[in-house]
Amino acid sequence: MIKVGIVGGTGYTGVELLRLLAQHPQAEVVVITSRSEDGVKVTDLYPNLRGHYDGLAFSVPDVAKLGACDVVFFATPHGVAHALAGELLDAGTRVIDLSADFRLQDAEEWSRWYGQPHGAAHLLGEAVYGLPEVNREQIRGARLIAVPGCYPTATQLGFLPLLENGLVDNGRLIADCKSGVSGAGRAAKISSLFTEAGESMMAYAVKGHRHLPEISQGLRRAAGGEVGLTFVPHLTPMIRGIHATLYATLVDTSVDVQGLYEKRYADEPFVDVMPAGSHPETRSVRGANMCRVAVHRPQGGDLVVILSVIDNLVKGASGQAIQNMNIVFGMDERLGLNNVALLP
């Protein structure tokens, strides 16, 4: 049984880790931390977990207790993992970070986007970007894994087959993405209030979103060179979900785009390439660790439109984190993640 610790268990990604790990046959959560909820029983804060974590309570982070775990998940705000990751790695504990602390390989670029110095730049060299569909072999031997963000997951999985095969104009990529309100986190914010976000939709951070450098970094790796990306995120009045509508211009119109995607993801357990002409819905992945993708060529022209949907809290965060854990410990990566999406 894998002993699991969670740092920062009171946010949406933290409780999602608990929900998914409750059905994992080879993992046991033994430590969960929260400075603000120290001593509070997990089931008092989250009654949906009654019967699964009745003896577990939140505690102040303790390196000794966390270091006794086989793996520690960080479900914390950006900058928190910098302080503890090194000590846990020294103790022989694997670290899987759901924040952005180790996603960018350039410490100076991270500092520009997150407004503070990088607190553990010496660890960036060994941090593995945890997108299994790209880095599965590197993940197997990793001590430190940076779980991709929600927008980056949906966008990269949508663009990858085209960029890997040099089939599009890399300088003219567009990602038009929509997110549910849970993507903003559990902290109280006026913009996340029901009366503010309900019955409305808005674009935000058009000038530059923190996920832009992460997406660009991944797309450059896939393309083997520079890319030009316009990324526009939107807030939509739903709780969960990411819908990415992606646009690229083909340089070879003879290619069978549908066949290309089906072949690329044929062996991927958590990417579903839908039949030609499909329009995937966010509700079709709600609560599931699945990315559903559909490919279109309107009027048979040179423009490709890719539709990519995920649950931002599962494949976009906690589910993907557990998928990484399964790979690291040599288990079937589907363990604990086979639940079917919720409908309606």
Image (spheres, rainbow, N blue to C red):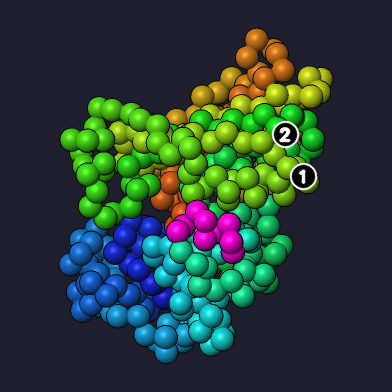
| Distance from the alpha carbon under mark 2 to that under mark 1 | 9 Å
Q: Which mark is residue 170?
A: 2
Report the side of 16 relative to 130 (left or right).
left
Q: Quadrant of residue 80?
A: bottom left
Q: Position of residue 182 (x, y in %)?
A: 33, 47
User: Looking at the picture, which amino acid does disc 2 mark?
Assistant: Asn
Callout 2: few (<14), some (14-19), or many (20+) C-alpha neighbours within 10 Å? many
Percent x, y for residue 279?
51, 24
Question: Which of 305 and 83 lies nearest the eye of the viewer?
Answer: 83
For image coordinates 59% across by 64% down, the residue present is 107
Task: Classify 137 as above or below 243.
Answer: below
User: What mark, if any, has residue 271 been given in the picture?
Assistant: none
What secondary structure prevails in the magenta region?
Answer: helix
Q: Position of residue 45 (x, y in %)?
A: 20, 64
Residue tagged 1: 225
For this view, does 84 lie left or right of residue 48? right
Total residue callouts? 2
Q: Which residues are magenta?
A: 107-115
Q: Amino acid at mark 1?
A: Gly
Residues at marks 2 and 1 touching, judged by CB atoms closer than 8 Å: yes
What secondary structure is found at the residue carrying circle 1? loop
Residue 114 magenta-drawn? Answer: yes
